[in-house]
Amino acid sequence: MAKFVRKGKGGMPSLNTSSLPDIIFMLLFFFMVTTTLRDTEKLVMVKLPEATEIVKLERKDLSSYINIGTPILSKQGEYGTDARIQLNDSFKTVDDIRDFIAAERENKSEADRNFMTVSIKADENVRMGIITDVKQELRRCSALKIMYSARSGKVK
């Protein structure tokens, strides 16, 4: 009878890394496809007010944003330090809100137009008169679903 003899320790086999670049590129491609980029550049500084009752928005793709606040430092020389209204990538007045809402409705599908929500992101130190003017103009153009953005506050 023959004896089975082991020739050395054998050790750990080397790890096959030939498919590792394929996996990395698949992950990279996945994150590139699923990530949404910011649509507009922020031109105003907004520190959201605190709120205790917060509800998350269900579909962010159906919302249009109106930012209200003081211009960023690089724009203060041109526009001053008073609160301004930002629609998309430019400063506008209350009278331009009607055209903004009409353009946003055109970008939505026919079925989703009724579910469009206008989100007002206003700085906590903005005068209420500007926000009231914006709300009145939104009523005139039949944009009645309005959401106010806020940060989470602690319940006391």
Image (cartoon, rainbow, N blue to C red):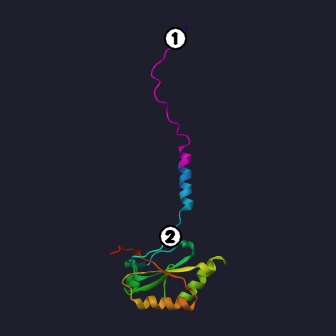
Residue extent of the magenta highlight: 2-23
The answer to whether 8 appears left or right of 108 in the picture is left
The residue sitting at 54% across, 46% down in the picture is 21
According to the picture, the residue beneath numbered tag 2 turns out to be 38
> Can you say whether 32 is above or below 88 in the image?
above
Q: Give the image quarter of residue 75.
A: bottom left
- Amino acid identity at mark 1: Lys
Local packing at callout 2 (Cα closer than 10 Å; few below 14, some 14-19, many 20+) is few
Of residues 127 and 84, the one drawn nearer to the viewer in this rendering: 127
Indicate the quadrant containing the N terminus: top left, top right, bottom left or bottom right: top right
- Amino acid identity at mark 2: Arg
153 drawn magenta? no
Task: Report helix, strand or loop for mark 2.
Answer: loop
Task: Report helix, strand or loop for mark 1.
Answer: loop
The residue sitting at 45% across, 76% down in the picture is 42
- Point out the frontmost of discs 1 and 2: 1
**Image mark for residue 3:** 1
Q: Give the image quarter of residue 100.
A: bottom right
Of residues 154 and 98, the one drawn nearer to the viewer in this rendering: 154
* N-terminal-most mark, 1 or 2: 1
The answer to whether 26 appears left or right of 128 in the picture is right
* Main secondary structure along the magenta-highlighted residues: loop
**Image mark for residue 20:** none
The residue sitting at 39% across, 76% down in the picture is 52
Indicate the quadrant containing the C terminus: top left, top right, bottom left or bottom right: bottom left
Of residues 13 and 82, the one drawn nearer to the viewer in this rendering: 13
Of residues 115 and 37, the one drawn nearer to the viewer in this rendering: 115
